[in-house]
Amino acid sequence: MNIHDNVTSIGDAAFSRCYILSKVKISDSIESIGKEAFKGSLDAKTVEFDGTKARWEELGGMSLASENDTVICSDGTFGE
């Protein structure tokens, strides 16, 4: 699933327990991501973020994803 440039906010638990979600691509134009936005799926997923690792952390970092997830940023990867 791609979250496009025109989306600036993702709400709390927006994709929580979305069991079929395996890959999310988020534009670096995102301004806020709610708590536990991607938590609760059964399988590990990949989150591709067009911004930097520092920017991902500013948005809430790995607390947004499940502990088994991989987050790929423009300058590196979390969760490998």
Image: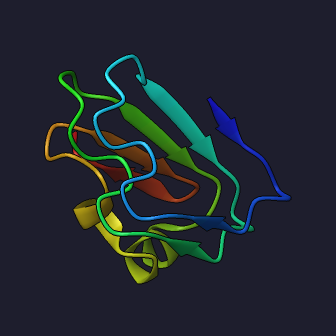
Report the label total. 0
Q: Residue at x 32, y 43 (%)?
A: 16
Give the quadrant of the C terminus: top left
Q: Quadrant of residue 42?
A: top left
Q: Residue at x 23, y 65 (%)?
A: 63
Q: Quadrant of residue 32?
A: bottom right
Residue 28: percent from left, percent from top = 69, 64
Give the quadrant of the N terminus: top right
Residue 21: percent from left, percent from top = 43, 24
Q: Residue at x 31, y 21 (%)?
A: 19
Residue 46: percent from left, percent from top = 40, 33
Along the line of sight, the residue nearer the viewer: 57 or 40: 40
From the viewer's perspective, tell me whether residue 40 is left or right of residue 16: left
Residue at the top extreme of this rendering = 20
Please say which color scheme the image uses: rainbow
Residue at the bottom extreme of this rendering = 58
The image shows residue 58, relative to residue 46, as above or below, that is below
From the viewer's perspective, tell me whether residue 26 is left or right of residue 17: right
Residue 48: percent from left, percent from top = 53, 43
The image shows residue 5, relative to residue 17, as above or below, that is below
Along the line of sight, the residue nearer the viewer: 11 or 25: 11
Residue at the right extreme of this rendering = 6
Q: Residue at x 72, y 68 (%)?
A: 8
